[in-house]
Structure formats: C-alpha cells, structure tokens
Image (cartoon, rainbow, N blue to C red):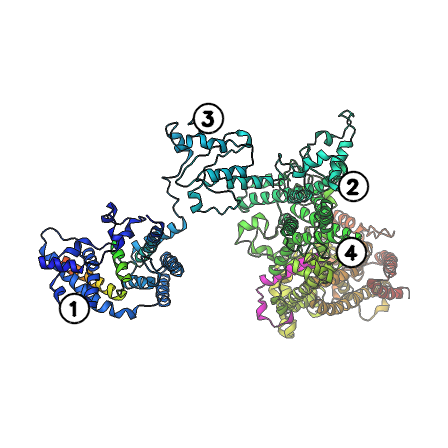
C-alpha cells in the first residue's frame, strides 16, 4: 500500500475515531458504521441539519413500525 | 425488473480507484475499532443497494444535476435506512416496502433540500459556541466528567481542523464543522451510559494504551524460541555463525563505537543512530537496532541482529546507553569515578607553579617514601587516590550542611579514607578545612536530632491525648520529663533556622549551577559584580559570615537546658515544666545579652528570633490569662479542673487549687483573692520533678524578661476573673477603662518585638534577617508598656466596681461605727446595758442577751439616725467565746471582756478587703476600747456629792479616782482622736486615690490603715508590755472600785446610771472580805507582764463563793487598812503610768508616722507629774 494513501487512511481513521467519541459523548445513538456513512454523505455535500432531520424521522418511522409489529 | 436493473446500473457512481482494488475480507465485516480497513471501505458503494430495483420515484423526470445527486445519494441513503430500520427478515414484504419508501423519501429530502440548504452550515466558530454550550450545560448539571470529556474531544477535533489541509483527505478538515454540527443536531440528553463512556474516554486519554506488543522482541520471546532459529541468534556463541559478509565489521571491535556504527549503517539497513540526538520517538524506534546491553569494548562479540519490525525497549538503544555513560561520567560521587585529567596530571608529575592542580599530587609524591607507614599521617596511609573538582567538593559540603548523605563525610560528619581529595590542596589544608565544616555540620545535625526528638515526644503526647493520661502515666511522665509548649516552640524555632540554612545552601548551589549555564550570578551572593568564585574556603567563610556562631550557641543552649543526649535521642528534662520553661527562656535571654555585648550581631539576631519564637507560648498564656482571668466554672468542668485548672504547668502563675474542689464556693473564700492564684516563685512546690534540689532551689520560675511585669500580669488576670465572676459586662460600660479593655488586642510576641523596631538600611539589605534587632532593654520596656496600661485599666475598673457598686462605703462605715466605736451613741447605750449587767453579777455573756441588746440599740439608732448611718443588724453578731464564765472576774479585772467577739458578716467581694484576719484585728481594737470604757464607766460611778470634807478618807479616794480617771480619759481620748479618727480620715482619702489604681491597692491601703490603728492601740506584740501595763491600770480601776465600795459601804448608791439594782444589799460584806485579798501589781518593769494571768488563777483559788451576812457599817480600823491600800495603789499607778510614759516616749522617738502620734500621747502624759 502506498504510504501516502495509508497516511490518508490513518488520518481519516483518526478523525473518524474522534468524531465517533464525540457522537458517543453527545449521545447520538449512532453506531460506527452509520456514522461512517453519515460522514461520507456530509463530505459529499449533504446538509448536516437535513441529514440529522432525516435520520431522526427514520428513527421515528422505525419506532412506529416496530410498534405496529 | 430488467429495466430497473439497467437504471440502477446507470445510477451507479463512477468507481473510484479505491473501490477497484480487490475486496479485502475485512471490508464486509463490521467495522472494528482501530482497524485501518474500515475507512477504506468508506469509498466503496454499498453494493447490495445499488443493484436493487429502485422505487418509482426514480423514474421521475429529473434534471441532470438532480440525477447526479440522486445517484450519489442513493447508496448512502440505502445504507442509512437499512441501519436505522434494521435488516429485514426473510420474506418480510412489509419491511421491504417500507425500506424502499424510506430510501426514496430520504433521497428526496436530502437531494432536494439538503444540497440546497448548504448555506445553513455553521462555520467553526459557531460550532465552537454550540459545543461550549453543551459543556456548560453539563457543568450546570454537575456532570463534570462529561463536560471535561466533551471539551477534550472537541479540543482534539479543533487540533485536527487546524492541522494541515490535504485536499485528498477522505474527511476534509474544512468540513469538520459540518460533521460536528450533524452530531450536535443528533445529540440527545446524556444517559448514565454516556457518563460512563465519558469517564472511560477520559481515562483512555490519560492512560494511552501501550504499544501493541505482538511485534515486540523481548528477551523472553527470544529465549522461548527454539534455539538457533531466528536472526537474533546469529553470531551468538553457540548460536548460528555469523554470515561472512557481516563478520568483518562486527569484529572490528577495537575501533571506536561511532566508527563501528557507521560501518553498521552502511552495511545493513539498520538504524543510522550515530548521533547523540536523543529525540527518540516512536517512528524512530520502529527501525531501531537491537544493541546488546553490555557493550564492553573488549567483549569482542557484537550482536548485530537485524530485527526489522516492532518496537524495542528504550534501554536497548545505543543512544540510551551513551546518555547513561555520559551521565555516569558526571557522577563524581561514585567511588570509581575518576577525573579525566587526573591520569595525565599524575603521569606528568611535575610541579607547575602556574597550575594549582599539580600541588596536591606533588606534595603527596614528595612525602618520604621510605618512611615506615606507622609514622605517616593516618589519613595519608588510608586515603585513596581519588580527586574531585573543587566545585563538586563545595556542592558536597553544601549537601553535608543540609544534613544529607555526601561523598566527603561519613554519617558523623568526619572525613574518611574514602574522602576524595582536591588537586590543589595539600592534605593538611584540606583536612583542616573539612574538619571545620564538619564540626558545623555535626552541630547542625545534633540540633536536627534535637528538634526531631522533641517533635516525636510531642507527637506521642498529642496522640495519647492530654485528658486521658492516667495517674500512672503521669507518674511515668514525671520520671521521663514533660514536654512543654515552650520547648516545642523552641524546637520549632531552631528548625526554622535550620531551614533557613538549608535554603541558603540551596541558593548557593543554585547560584553556581546558574553560573555554569552562563546565567548572571544570584544577586544575593554577588553584590560587587565580581563574578562568582566557587571555592571551599569561600564557602566556609560565607557560612561563618552568614551564620556566625549561631548554631553552636543554640546547641549550647539546648545542652544547658536539656542536657547531653544519649545515643542521639534527647530526653526531656526532668524538672517541673515551669522550671524548664524559665530556664530555657532565661538561658536564651542571657545568651542574647552576652552576644549583644560582644557585638556579635548576627548570632544575637538568630538567638533573638529563636527566643521570640520560644517565648510565644508563654506570651500567649499571659494573653489568655489577662484576657480571660481565672476560670470560675470549676464546678462545671471537673475534668479540666482536676488536671490542674486551666493554667498550663509551665506558666509562671499557678492555681493553688483553692476553690477548684468547691466550685463557685472557692471564689467566696476570703483567701481566694490573695492565695487562689500566685506566682510560682517558691521552689518547694513541684519538688517531685526535681532531681537535683540544690541546682533548682536557686532557680526562679518566672522568666527574667517577664519578672518586672509578673505581678501586673497576675493582678490583671485576677481582676478580669473577678470582674467576670461579678458579671460585669465591659461593653455596657462607658468608662474609659472598660472601653480600653474591650478594645484590647493581644499581639503576638513577634509583633510586639518587631513593632517599632528600628529599620536601618543595612537591615533591609539582609532581607528580613535583622527583623529582631531590638535590644534587651527595649524589649523589657516594650513588654512593660504593653502590659501596664491594661493592668491599670483592669485594676482600677475592678476597684471602682467593688467600691462603688458593692456598698463598700456603707460597710466600711458600719465597721468603723461599731468596731472603732465611732458611733458613740450606740456604743454607750450598749455598754451601759452590758456594764450594768456585769455590775449586777448577772450572766452578761449570754448570746441572746448580747445580740438582743446590741441590735435593739442599733435598730433604735437606725430609726432616728440619718439614712447613710443605717447599719444592717442582721449582719452583726456578738458572741462570748471566753473560757468558763466567772462572775467575779468581771469585777476584778477587765480580762473577761477578751472573750467577747463582735462579728460582722461581710458580703462576697468585700471579704477580700475585710478578711477574717482583718476583722479579728478590728475585734481586738473593739475589745480594748470596751475595756477602757469599762474602767471609765466604773470610775464615773464613784461619785459622792457634797459633804466630802466630812470624811478625810474620802480625799485619798478622790485623789486616787481623779488620777485614775485622768489617765483613763487621756488614754481613751488619745485613742479615739489620734489613733482612730485621724488615720480614718487619711484612710478615706487614700482610698479614693487607691480606687483609681487597683483593687490590690485598695486592699493594701486598708490593711495599712488597720495595721496602723492596731499598732497604735498598743496591740502589737512589740508593745505588749505597754498594753499589759495599761490593762493593769484598768484592772486597778476595778480594784479601786472595789475598795471604794468597801469604804463607802454601798457603791450602788452613787450609781446614777445603773439600770440594774439587784443584790445591792448583800455586797458590802463580800466586798470587805475581798479586800483582804492581796492584789500584787508587779512593780518591777518586767516587760513580760504575765502577772495578770497568774493573778487570775490565784484569785480563783483564794476566793470562796460563800455569801456572808452583810454588815452595813465600816470601822476606822478597816478604813486605815483601806487607806494603806489606796496609797499603795497610788504608788503602783504612778509606777505604771511612768512606765507607760517611758514606753510611749521610746515609741515617739522614731521618725515614722506612728512616732508623731505617740509623741502626742507622750506629751499628754507629761502632765502626769503636774
């Protein structure tokens, strides 16, 4: 693996770790995979607020779904 | 379905380079913490979602931009929705439908709104604010852990954001704010698990995990492996032989290490660690060479192992080793340390006058070699050839002064054979210098041992607790000596001095260390800008200049007070605590005086500081004593009282235990004021502590610097105590004294000494060392000035309270009226009744009769008299305490009146003035006056009116009568006017003055007055002869009365004032019979005058009690006999009066106040001859 790329990955890994810690501390209930996806989405230009709103909505839907089931 | 898949394939985003790489097995797994593969998978599209048929929404006509966005979003959204909704079960159509719905919805949401509303993204500043808000919130909720964790986490993110920006980063730093914003938007209130996580997170941050060990090569692993395998076995004896090509550089062992490493560097891919740079970080250590621990150059074997992966412990590196060796080369104190130049110098061996370092070795070399070793100085024979630099020696000396282990001295601060030498010193000079310093070190060390011993003793006492010490313990403590506060304070003050010394040593060391690094020398040690010279001699001199003789003197004091220690353990002195305290303070004080006289200023200052520190406890005790006075609640606090009251044993004022057993009653004891508390100036008490009576009997218990105020202190404390006991509240009073006492502040002894001490410029330069440059006289003066006003205030306040508020004047007036018979009306009324009773031979000593008669008189006078002359009858009691009652004696002598006593019940605080002893004196005066009055009364009854010429015998009687009454009247007049009235007037005046001074002054004035009156009534033992003579004259009066009664037949006919007329007809006979009794008055002027006593006894024997029939006629024969007796009596009287006159003249001979008074009497008695 070219060292430059591995450096980048390591750096991203570090950032992601810290973000994950932050999410834990803020009690966001996001697991690491979801957070990774979310980070990617935000990186690709999605508005974080909108994304948050969508996830909250999805959670509500899910709760409703589970409740119906 | 086909169409769907084709569209879906259209939507597939262009694959990045990352995604083209072969899928690793990791990429499908759940992302693991710390795995680098996780992030790599970020780039990969979610495969399953991307090939799945999309919903109808995707058919909608879209702009190109939208299509692109949707295409990009779809896999993400699929992922997210799946994560949130969970994996559908098999055949769960409902779930599947919902899933697609949701994906569509979210793509729409995010596609249409999300991208358009990008403007809403906050910048980093806004995010920071929001995070701070969260932190603040957590703090408000007392979730400090969470707040800390958030802060640190955010800090880390900020660091990241501020770091280098790499456009190719997977996660762009510029978008970090958006990420945090997203997290903040997602945040929900913390749960317990969040808090736990926060603490775990903080813990992990504080204790970073050790580097993974799996790749680390340790000796353990090497040894666990099978032998002869692995690279590290190459070259080991018995291991794999070295490859040929490596052998040659590895065996180039003779060359320098650096060269060897250069070789290694070129021949292998090993670490190029040929520099001394020790910035060894992790990246470096990854490629480090494994170096053998022992790199002895002559070992000939070098392990040039080639370990290519993993960390190696730091100590295995060459740089580490080199650093270690470098450091060791500076450790001049190691026994095997050698000065670099030493070898060369000694080899050269010649003496060079320009090089001081050649002196020592040269001198040693020129010592006679052939001399037998016994004749050589011992230290030379024993000493080893080890030299150290002088600055190192200075450092060691400073360390030694601080009492620590050092290279120069052993633990007794003596040089040993291992003591290194200095190159430019001769052995003797070095020895003498080190010995001098060693002596100082020893002194200081002994002082250290003393302080620690004292502290240990004190700790033991404290831990046991003062209150719970049993009697046995106390006895044992008596044997081993007692810890006193003063000794503790003394030890503490010494300790402070030692700490100063240690600080001084550290500063010196710091100064030369700074100088080594090129810093300016410490200003304190280099005032003249001459640069810093570090030399042994200079250090020794500086030490002497700075501390002079202070430590030696302190040790001297310690030894004087405590005695020589046994085996480094200083026992406490076995004497009474107050004696120890006094001895300690006095010794210190006299040392200060000595030093001041010698002009040894620095030592005197140090001693003064120690003295001030040591005197502080006693000073505080004084403060407490004069602030609170004695405790009057002894009854309530028995436990405290039994231990010895509230006063410390070392205090120079002691409680005599009066009133401690009785509680408040003790206070009422008239002796309480005088004796309840006293100065410990007698050495007899507390002798249980004295081992050597001779040495301690001459020692006082009041520290000499407090001697001049000791009485003031005692009186102030008593005054305050009594004021408190009387319930006087200072704050309610407006008088100046009360205000003064209220505002009284007790300064610490140090403040007292420092206040107003002169500050001279040179004092300032020595930076507070000269704080106590106060002289001994100034100190005494200052103590006096501090204490005296307070003593005055308390004394005068108490005196005023007692005199003005305790009815002092009315009681004094009552006492004067009764005892000193100043109220003639009451007394003459009473005496009339009393004498009539006596004359009538009735039992006049009856308790009820006496008291009824007396109180009736007083009550009568109270009714008629003015208000201020009111006398409380209930306070007065008359009683007769004489021997068996003899009626007849009352007629023949005035002695029976002695048995009468007049008691006056004095209320509480005044009992301190009118003590029982004083009242006894008053009573004696009263009796004497009563006896004179009795005589006078009898004489006055002998009155025959008219026809006096008819009987020639009567002339003799009247002559006698007038002579007697002249004397009695003159004497009584003298007593009432000059002995009682005049001093009383001056006493009242003196009292008014004393009142403004102190209560003790009042007591003293009163006693003075009373003593004066008592003495002038001839009642003191010195004038006993005169007193007896006067009594004889009085007795003579009674006898004369008898004679006259016999002569006149019936005296009662002349009695004009007698109230009682009983038994008058049967008396003449008796009286006549009695005439026969010879009354022997002593003619010789024997001062012992014990005749009256024996006389009474004789009479008792001779006289019979039978009453004969009265014959109411007298013959001339009897008359002749009577005249002879009268004449004889007259002669006797003449002798007695002359005797009294001579005595009084003698008394009048002096120059005292009494002499003038007696002069008056003597002058009056001159008239006797006329």
CA distance separating discs 2 and 4? 96 Å
- Frontmost of labels 2 and 4 is 2
- Tags 3 and 4 on a common chain: yes
Q: Residues within 10 Å of mark 1 (few under 14, many from 20)?
A: few
Q: Disc 1 designates what residue? A: B62
Expressed as whole percent of the image width and height from the top left, the position of residue B858 reads 64, 68
* Residues at marks 2 and 4 touching, judged by CB atoms closer than 8 Å: no
Mark 2 or 4, nearer chain start: 2
Tag 2 subunit: B
Considering depth in this image, is B1064 or B516 the residue closer to the camera?
B516
- Frontmost of labels 1 and 4 is 1
- Tags 3 and 1 on a common chain: yes
Mark 2 or 3, nearer chain start: 3
Q: Residues within 10 Å of mark 4 (few under 14, many from 20)?
A: some
Mark 1 or 2, nearer chain start: 1
- Frontmost of labels 3 and 4 is 3
Considering depth in this image, is B1126 or B34 the residue closer to the camera?
B34
CA distance separating discs 3 and 4? 119 Å
One can see residue A32 in this view: no
Q: Which residues are magenta?
A: B709-736
In the rendered view, tell whether residue B284 sits above or below residue B45: above
Q: Secondary structure at mark 1?
A: loop
Magenta region's main secondary structure? Answer: helix
Q: Disc 4 designates what residue? A: B1020
Q: Secondary structure at mark 4?
A: loop
- On residue B237, the disc is 3
Q: Is residue B474 left or right of residue B134?
A: right
């Amino acid at each position: 693996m070219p060292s430059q790329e591995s450096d980048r990955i390591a750096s991203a890994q570090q950032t992601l770790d810290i973000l994950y810690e932050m999410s834990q501390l803020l009690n966001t209930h996001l697991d690491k995979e979801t957070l990774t996806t979310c980070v990617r989405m935000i990186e690709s230009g999605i508005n974080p607020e909108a994304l948050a709103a969508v996830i909250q909505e999805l959670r509500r839907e899910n709760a409703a779904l589970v409740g119906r089931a | 379905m086909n169409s769907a898949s084709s569209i879906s394939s259209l939507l597939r985003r262009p694959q990045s380079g990352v995604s083209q790489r072969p899928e690793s097995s990791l990429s499908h797994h759940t992302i693991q913490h710390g795995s680098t593969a996780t992030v790599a998978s970020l780039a990969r599209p979610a495969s399953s979602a991307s090939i799945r048929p999309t919903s109808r929404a995707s058919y909608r006509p879209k702009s190109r931009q939208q299509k692109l966005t949707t295409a990009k979003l779809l896999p993400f959204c699929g992922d997210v929705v799946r994560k949130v909704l969970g994996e559908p079960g098999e055949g769960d159509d409902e779930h599947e439908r919902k899933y697609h719905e949701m994906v569509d919805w979210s793509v729409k949401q995010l596609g249409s709104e999300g991208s358009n509303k990008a403007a809403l993204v906050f910048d980093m500043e806004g995010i920071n604010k929001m995070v701070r808000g969260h932190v603040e919130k957590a703090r408000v909720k007392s979730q400090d852990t969470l707040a800390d964790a958030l802060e640190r986490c955010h800090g880390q993110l900020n660091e990241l954001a501020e770091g280098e920006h790499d456009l190719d980063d997977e996660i762009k730093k510029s978008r970090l704010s958006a990420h945090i914003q997203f997290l903040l938007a997602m945040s929900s209130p913390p749960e317990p698990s969040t808090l736990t996580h926060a603490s775990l997170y903080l813990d992990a941050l504080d204790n970073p995990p050790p580097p993974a060990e799996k790749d680390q090569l340790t000796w353990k692993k090497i040894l666990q492996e099978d032998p002869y395998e692995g690279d590290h076995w190459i070259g080991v004896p018995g291991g794999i032989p070295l490859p040929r090509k490596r052998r040659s550089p590895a065996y180039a062992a003779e060359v320098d290490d650096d060269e060897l490493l250069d070789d290694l560097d070129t021949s292998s891919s090993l670490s190029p660690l040929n520099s001394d740079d020790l910035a060894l970080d992790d990246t470096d250590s990854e490629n480090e060479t494994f170096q053998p621990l022992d790199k002895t150059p002559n070992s000939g074997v070098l392990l040039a192992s080639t370990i290519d992966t993993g960390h190696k412990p730091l100590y295995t590196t060459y740089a580490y080793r080199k650093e270690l060796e470098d450091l060791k080369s500076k450790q001049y104190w190691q026994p095997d340390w050698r000065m670099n130049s030493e070898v060369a110098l000694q080899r050269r061996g010649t003496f060079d006058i320009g090089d001081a370092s050649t002196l020592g070795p040269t001198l040693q070399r020129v010592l006679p070699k052939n001399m037998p070793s016994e004749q050589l100085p011992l230290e030379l024979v024993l000493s080893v050839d080890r030299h150290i630099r002088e600055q190192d020696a200075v450092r060691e000396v400073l360390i030694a002064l601080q009492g620590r282990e050092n290279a120069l001295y052993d633990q007794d601060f003596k040089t040993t054979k291992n003591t290194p030498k200095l190159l430019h010193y001769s052995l003797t000079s070095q020895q003498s210098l080190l010995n001098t310093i060693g002596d100082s070190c020893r002194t200081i060390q002994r002082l250290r041992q003393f302080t620690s011993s004292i502290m240990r003793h004190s700790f033991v006492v404290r831990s046991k607790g003062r209150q719970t010490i049993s009697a046995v313990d106390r006895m044992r403590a008596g044997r081993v000596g007692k810890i006193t506060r003063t000794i503790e304070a003394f030890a503490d003050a010494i300790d402070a001095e030692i700490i100063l010394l240690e600080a001084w040593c550290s500063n010196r060391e710091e100064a030369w260390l700074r100088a080594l690094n090129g810093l300016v020398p410490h200003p304190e040690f280099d005032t003249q800008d001459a640069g810093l010279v570090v030399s042994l001699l200079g250090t020794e001199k500086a030490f002497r200049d700075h501390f002079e003789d202070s430590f030696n003197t302190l040790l001297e004091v310690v030894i004087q007070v405590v005695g020589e220690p046994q085996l480094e353990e200083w026992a406490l002195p076995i004497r009474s605590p107050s004696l120890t305290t006094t001895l300690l303070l006095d010794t210190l004080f006299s040392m200060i005086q000595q030093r001041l006289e010698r002009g040894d200023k620095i030592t005197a200052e140090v001693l003064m500081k120690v003295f001030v520190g040591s005197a502080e406890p006693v000073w505080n005790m004084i403060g407490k004593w004069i602030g609170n006075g004695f405790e009057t609640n002894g009854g309530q606090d028995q436990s405290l009282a039994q231990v010895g009251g509230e006063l410390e044993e070392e205090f120079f004022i002691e409680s005599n235990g009066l009133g401690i057993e009785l509680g408040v009653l003790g206070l009422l004891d008239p002796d309480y004021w005088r004796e309840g508390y006293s100065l410990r100036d007698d050495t007899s008490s507390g002798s249980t502590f004295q081992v050597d009576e001779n040495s301690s009997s001459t020692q006082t218990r009041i520290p000499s610097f407090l001697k001049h105020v000791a009485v003031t202190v005692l009186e102030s404390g008593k005054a305050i105590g009594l004021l408190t006991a009387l319930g006087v509240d200072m704050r309610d009073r407006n008088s100046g004294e009360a205000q003064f006492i209220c505002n009284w502040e007790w300064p610490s002894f140090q403040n007292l000494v420092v206040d107003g001490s002169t500050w001279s410029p040179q004092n300032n330069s020595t930076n507070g060392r000269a704080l106590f440059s106060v002289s001994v006289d100034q100190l005494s003066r200052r103590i006096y000035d501090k204490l005296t006003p307070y003593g005055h205030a308390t004394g005068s306040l108490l005196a005023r309270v007692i005199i003005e508020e305790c009815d002092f004047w009315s009681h004094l007036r009552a006492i004067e009226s009764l005892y000193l018979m100043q109220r003639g009306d009451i007394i003459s009324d009473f005496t009339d009744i009393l004498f009539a009773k006596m004359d009538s031979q009735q039992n006049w000593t009856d308790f009820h009769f006496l008291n009824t008669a007396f109180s009736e008189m007083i009550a009568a006078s109270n009714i008629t008299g003015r208000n201020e002359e009111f006398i409380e009858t209930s306070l007065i009691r008359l009683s007769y305490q004489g021997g068996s009652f003899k009626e007849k004696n009352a007629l023949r002598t005035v002695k029976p009146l002695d048995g009468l006593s007049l008691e006056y019940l004095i209320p509480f605080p005044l009992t301190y003035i009118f003590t029982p002893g004083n009242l006894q004196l008053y009573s004696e005066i009263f009796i004497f006056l009563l006896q004179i009055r009795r005589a006078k009364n009898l004489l006055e009854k002998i009155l025959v009116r008219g026809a006096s010429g008819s009987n020639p015998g009567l002339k003799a009687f009247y002559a006698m009568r007038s002579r007697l009454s002249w004397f009695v009247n003159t004497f009584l007049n003298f007593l009432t006017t000059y002995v009682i009235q005049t001093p009383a007037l001056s006493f009242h005046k003196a009292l008014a003055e004393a009142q403004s001074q102190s209560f003790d002054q009042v007591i003293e004035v009163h006693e003075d007055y009373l003593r004066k009156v008592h003495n002038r009534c001839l009642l003191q033992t010195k004038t006993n002869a005169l007193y007896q003579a006067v009594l004889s004259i009085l007795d003579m009066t009674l006898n004369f009365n008898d004679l006259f009664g016999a002569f006149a037949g019936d005296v009662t006919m002349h009695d004009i004032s007698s109230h009682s007329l009983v038994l008058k007809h049967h008396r003449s006979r008796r009286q006549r019979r009695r005439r026969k009794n010879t009354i022997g008055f002593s003619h010789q002027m024997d001062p012992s005058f014990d005749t009256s006593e024996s006389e009474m006894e004789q009479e008792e024997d001779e006289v019979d009690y039978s009453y004969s029939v009265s014959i109411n006629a007298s013959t001339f024969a009897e008359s002749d006999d009577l005249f002879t007796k009268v004449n004889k009596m007259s002669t006797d009287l003449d002798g007695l009066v002359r005797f009294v006159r001579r005595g009084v003249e003698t008394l009048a001979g002096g120059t005292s106040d009494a002499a003038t008074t007696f002069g008056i009497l003597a002058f009056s008695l001159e008239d006797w001859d006329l």
